[in-house]
Amino acid sequence: MATIDRYYFNVCTKGAERRGRSLDALVAGTGLSSTDFAHPGWRGPVEAMALLVRNIWAALDDEYMGYTARRAAPGSFAFACELALEGRDVADGLRRAARFYNLLDAGIVTDIHAADAGLVVEVCFAEPDRDPDHYFSEFWMIIWHRLACWLAGETISLLSAEFDYPRPGAYFEEFKYLFPCRHRFDAGARRIVMDAHALHAPIRRTPAELEAMLAAAPLDIMTIPASDVSAARRVRQLLTRSPDLTLDELAAEARLSTHILRRRLRAEGTSLATLRENVRRDRATRLLTSSNATVEAIAEALGYAEARSFTRAFRHWTGLSPSAWRASGGAHQTPLAAPRRRV
């Protein structure tokens, strides 16, 4: 199950809170407590984040979540996706959706165009001060990449991302997973560049698949989608069972050469090191939450030769040692009633 750092849970509600909505009311029904967000190192399920976003949409009657002067009425995303599905290819589909959003004149201008490097998505907020944490700006940029991947039915590589504000020190480690590409800060604009494949990739989705995606929205666009034959999906499945598998062993299981496996992971915007770290991090927090296993036993279960190596990695992920994290209550999570399976 994919998880999201507490930082994003803390900031995603700010637009609604500034509109007078209480945090406790916004988290109702998500399986979370507002106190979870205060625990150092806490991470919440991506399913809970999707439910929280839906609650904010409903509370404000606004899919822009209170971060613009004018609202985007519920149903806007669904209509934009219907327009995108009619595109000649992925790039054309995204342009159709962007034209619709721009016609709303709600405070965000989204420009999608071809460049030598690939497909560029550039966004401009009329009143950026309404989003001082840059939460919705980054969420909005991510949506266009994830929608492109969903339309294509495969992962389209994200090549670069630029931001007109300083490097986010408070959440940069998590930020790197959301934008798995080259970064440039204090730039002149907010833009992402996708691989040129997006310019001509066919749309492989059907109206029935769109209906299913919208029923769960925004869940399916909050993680990078991958086809069933994705190398990243296969490697993550293998690592979940045996986190210490080597590249050679993983390649043999996937029936690929090590060179091809490494190249495919890079094309999908990830690497073996990143996948291994994600799997270990998520499993570590689950074991600390649901068992009384010692730190030494957890380190061994995760494939670390020494407990101190695991402790050093865990401190990098959360800012605390495993023992301190468990003792602080940071491991507390309220499970969802019916969690969805994720890659």
Image: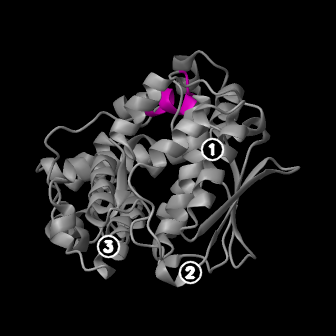
Q: Nearer the viewer, residue 77 or 290?
A: 77
Which quadrant is home to the N terminus?
A: top left
Which mark sits nearer the N-terminus, 1 or 3? 3
46 up-or-down from 163: above or below: above
Residue extent of the magenta highlight: 229-236
Dot label at residue 127: 2
Q: Residue 283: x, y in percent?
A: 30, 45
Q: Is residue 86 left or right of residue 28?
A: right
Residue that extends furthest to the top in the rendered view of this protein: 255
Magenta span main SS: helix
What's the CA distance linking mark 2 and mark 1? 32 Å
Q: Secondary structure at mark 2?
A: loop
Mark 1, other Cα within 10 Å: few <14 / some 14–19 / many ≥20: many
Q: Amino acid at mark 2?
A: Glu
Q: Is residue 45 left or right of residue 323?
A: right
Residue that extends furthest to the right in the rendered view of this protein: 116
Q: Secondary structure at mark 3?
A: helix
Q: Secondary structure at mark 1?
A: loop
Tell me, yes or no, whether the highlighted magenta stretch contains residue 234.
yes
Q: Which residue is mark 3?
A: 16
